[in-house]
Image (cartoon, rainbow, N blue to C red):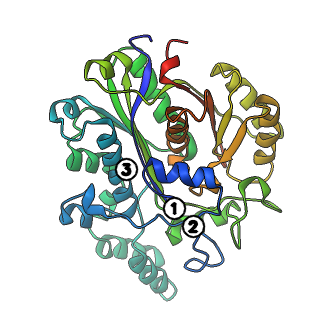
Amino acid sequence: MSPRDVVVTGLGLVSCAGEGVAAHLAALAAGARPRTDAETFAPWPVHPVAPLALDGQIPKKADQRQMEPWQRLGVYAAGLALDAAGLKGDAARKGALHLIVAAGGGERDYAADGQILTGLRDAADPGAYLNERLQNDLRPTLFLAQLSNLLAGNIAIVHGVTGASRTFMGEESSGVDALRIAGARIAAGQVDSVLVGGSYNAERADVLLVHEMGGYLYRPDYAPVFRREGRGGFILGSGAAFLVLEAAETAAARGAAPLARLAAVASDRTRRAPGSVAASLTALWREAGLEAPDAVISGATGCAGITREEAERLADLAPGARVSALGDLTGHTLEATAPFGAALAAALVARGAAREVAVTAVGHRRGEGVLRILPAREAGR
């Protein structure tokens, strides 16, 4: 094993499939229909996160109250990853642990939005009315709560992870690049350990509206990702996934047993002409050094066209491999898609259920990514 091999030493997962690695592997093996709420935002289904005992990872009620749901999910999953890596009580190592988060913006104040939109109908001067209401009706802290880097801040506050932090935005591609940058910095010797991941709250009327306006949502009920009819689309899922990545020599020095190796992360950004996704996946597969994976964790959205291209390409690139769609397990978690895929792949090889796992993350609008996960015992390969 090379001293700078990038190994996974901790995983933290929460989604509609439950909490923790065991729950997600059990759901993956069962292949059952994921937990779905088709009523709250009808006609659009969502995959709501399983109930969590937040006190287990966010002990202070004041901290819980000041976070929005996507932040609580991320902080909770980050705590699970730190626990699994044996770092939760090690203040010195957490002080040197770097943090990379992939996340979107925060949530709207629906009550204030509704009042402003209603008042605009009868306003004599709509522009002046809008400016006045935005200045006076929004809570002073609302804008800060919407900032994606506040998730990183809350992880630092609650868990004491005080190394340098970065936050990436940009839908599915941000999760790919969070892992790519984390792995590259460790391999280059710039840092020794990174906590990396993302979170998403799907149970929001505003994000459903945004994606429906783009024609990306699937309705009226759940269907498997690779068998969605018509224009296809995704069903959003609430969840979070975090991984502790370390240099092999760093993990060995503290006696941590690696779960898996993050062997490669490759990313691309095509113009999305017909056939571009298939061509991109072929090139990324080669760049990642994938040979004959016996499992594929696909972040396919279910959107027509790109999902079909991915399915057809995977049949050629990984013949005989078991292909599992994240959307059939967690729902589509946008920024957290690639971290979820990487975490599940690491869990599979750690259990000896796979020898080489490919992870894909093809964005619904832009960006493609492919990851290669190997067992830790093959880290020198």
Image location of residue 209, percent across then percent down: 59, 69
Q: Quadrant of the N terminus?
A: top left
**Residue bearing the label numbered 2:** 35
> Which residue is rendered at x = 67% and y = 46% of the image?
324
Report the front residue among 174 and 114. 174
Q: From this viewpoint, is residue 167 visible?
A: no
How far is disc 2 from disc 3 in space, using C-alphas?
19 Å
Residue 16's tag is 1
Dot 3: element: helix
Q: Are marks 2 and 1 in contact (CB under 8 Å)?
A: yes
Labels 2 and 1: the sequence-earlier one: 1
Image location of residue 112, percent across then percent down: 39, 78
Q: Which residue is the extreme one toward the bottom? A: 122
Q: How many marks?
A: 3
- Give the left or right position of residue 207, taking residue 125 as reference: right
Q: Amino acid at mark 1?
A: Cys
How far is disc 1 from disc 3 in space, using C-alphas?
13 Å
Q: Quadrant of the C terminus?
A: top right
Residue 77's tag is 3
Q: Which residue is the extreme one toward the front? A: 352
Q: Amino acid at mark 3?
A: Ala
The 10 Å Cα crowd at callout 3, few under 14, some 14 to 19, many 20 or more, is many
Labels 1 and 3: the sequence-earlier one: 1
Q: Amino acid at mark 2?
A: Arg
Labels 2 and 3: the sequence-earlier one: 2
Report the front residue among 364 and 340. 340
